[in-house]
Amino acid sequence: MKQRLHTVAIVDDHLLLSGSLEKLINSFDGFKVLFHASNGKELQHKLKANGVAPDIVLLDINMPVMDGFETAAWLNENYPQIKFLALSMEDDEKVILKMLQNGAKGYLLKDIHPDKLKIALSEVMDRGYYHSEKVAATLLHSIQPSNKEVEVKFKENELTFMQLACSEMTYKEIADVMNLSPKTIDGYRQELFNRLHIKNRVGLVIYALKNNIIEI
């Protein structure tokens, strides 16, 4: 049976780097570069012209015309099914957090080892995200000790769901463990996102750590 190729788009204004990345990714089993663009605006044009969206976008941050932050916001609104990884020389915690908050499924430095890049692409496809040690450390450093008493009250099932959601389990696996339907789990998730004013699973993990619902 022929292996399905996962498609990748590279968005970076450095043509030499884009070309090198394309050759590298095309050498990975199961991955193929669909196209590359020099900025977010060009990505918009190519997505509309091609009519086929890639599975993953490798997204640079510092680009002319339309940078990585603007592009991330546009992708979230118009192509939420595309998973994107930030790819940058910036090793700044504020930049990393902003990209994660904008929907990035991971953050890679441009000097990443080829083996790590292959792992990152595979994990994004298999698990939906890739968190390197740097990203994990950044998330932990962003958590400030809270002296305020937690006012939000949770039901037992909600607490169980939060604890399981902070693991690597999928929502379907969580539903199986809790003997609940996937639809009920989706309801817990959306209710918690609304009550806690968070947008994604990363936000839920940060909230749970800050408020001692889970421990490292």
Image (cartoon, rainbow, N blue to C red):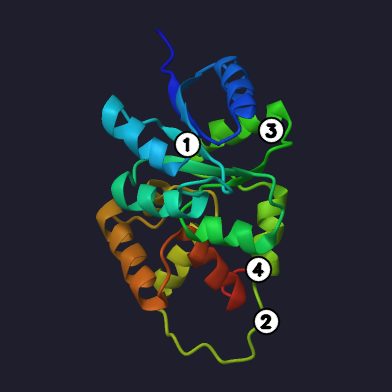
For marks 3 and 2, give the CA distance.
32 Å
Q: Which mark is residue 215?
A: 4
Q: Earlier in the sequence, mark 3 or mark 4?
A: 3
| Image marks 4 and 2: residues in contact by CB distance under 8 Å | no
Which mark lies nearer to you, 4 or 2?
A: 2
Which quarter of the rendering shows the C terminus?
bottom right
Q: Is residue 53 above or below residue 26?
A: below
Is residue 212 at all visible to an observer of this figure?
Answer: no
User: Percent from the top left, x then y, of residue 128?
Assistant: 47, 43
**Residue density around tag 2, few if under 14, some if 14–19, many if 20 or more, within 10 Å:** few
Which residue is found at the position 64% from the left and 32% from the top? 117
User: Percent from the top left, x then y, of residue 31?
Assistant: 50, 21
Which residue is found at the position 55% from the left and 32% from the top? 121
Which quarter of the rendering shows the N terminus?
top left
Q: Earlier in the sequence, mark 4 or mark 2?
A: 2
- Residue that badge 1 annotates: 57
- Residue that badge 2 annotates: 145
Which residue is found at the position 64% from the left and 43% from the top? 108
- Residue that badge 3 annotates: 116
Q: Nearer the viewer, residue 6 or 169?
A: 6
Q: Secondary structure at mark 2?
A: loop
**Residue density around tag 4, few if under 14, some if 14–19, many if 20 or more, within 10 Å:** few
For marks 2 and 1, give the CA distance.
35 Å
Is residue 58 at all visible to an observer of this figure?
Answer: yes
